[in-house]
Image (cartoon, helix red, strand yellow):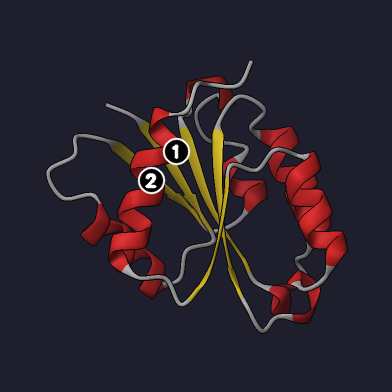
């Protein structure tokens, strides 16, 4: 059983995650923002964080830094829209690599891709 935190999920991402997790016994929590997520269970107890970046909310690579700081030992999956200007380019990709974000999925995401990514992320060793 894994402790999973979903941050900034829209209705499509919530539906996708529900479809991707049937039959798996995981404790899934949702948070509207990274700030609210920091007030939830201790970061050390989280196995996986799935965070949706939305450039319309002035999110960008800097938010990845805050995400990794907030959840240093969790495996992280970031979902992002391909067409968002803040998410394009070398700076974003460099930050993803430097922070060792395990997976970055570009929207639209298929159910099978989400299922595979979650399963793969949970088999990776925890960060310490």
The image position of residue 119, as x and y in percent, is 34, 41
Tell me the residue that label 1 is attached to: 121
The image position of residue 59, as x and y in percent, is 75, 66
Instruction: Establish if 104 lies above or below 5.
Output: below
The C terminus - image quarter: top right
Using residue 13 as the reference point, say whether residue 56 is left or right of it: right
Q: Quadrant of residue 20?
A: bottom left
Mark seen at residue 81? none
The image position of residue 75, as x and y in percent, is 54, 34
The N terminus - image quarter: top left
User: Is label 1 in contact with label 2 (beta carbons under 8 Å)?
Assistant: yes
For image coordinates 73% across by 50% down, the residue present is 96
Instruction: Establish if 76 lies above or below 74.
Output: below
Q: Which residue is at the far bottom?
A: 83
Tell me the residue that label 2 is attached to: 118
Q: Quadrant of residue 82?
A: bottom right
The image position of residue 90, as x and y in percent, is 85, 64
For image coordinates 22% across by 61% down, the residue present is 19
Using residue 53 as the reference point, say whether residue 86 is left or right of it: right
For image coordinates 80% across by 41% down, the residue present is 98
Label 1: state its secondary structure.
helix
> Mark 2: few, some, or many residues within 10 Å (few <14, many ≥20)?
many
Q: Which residue is at the far top?
A: 128
Label 2: state its secondary structure.
helix
For image coordinates 81% across by 50% down, the residue present is 95
Q: Nearer the viewer, residue 116 or 8?
A: 116
Using residue 69 as the reference point, say whether residue 41 is left or right of it: left
Instruction: Establish if 1 lies above or below 61.
Output: above
Instruction: Establish if 113 lies above or below 88.
Output: above
Using residue 1 as the reference point, say whether residue 51 is left or right of it: right
């Amino acid at each position: 059983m894994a402790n999973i935190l979903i941050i900034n999920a829209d209705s499509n991402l919530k539906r996708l995650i529900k479809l991707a997790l049937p039959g798996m016994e995981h404790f899934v929590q949702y948070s509207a923002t990274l700030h609210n997520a920091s007030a939830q269970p201790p970061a050390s107890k989280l196995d996986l964080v799935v965070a949706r970046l939305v450039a319309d909310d002035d999110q960008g690579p800097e938010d990845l830094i805050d995400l990794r700081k907030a959840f240093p030992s969790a495996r992280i999956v970031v979902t992002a829209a391909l067409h968002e200007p803040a998410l394009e380019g070398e700076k974003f990709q460099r930050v993803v690599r430097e922070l060792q974000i395990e997976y970055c999925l570009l929207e639209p995401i298929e159910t099978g891709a989400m299922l595979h990514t979650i399963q793969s992320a949970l088999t990776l060793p925890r960060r310490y």
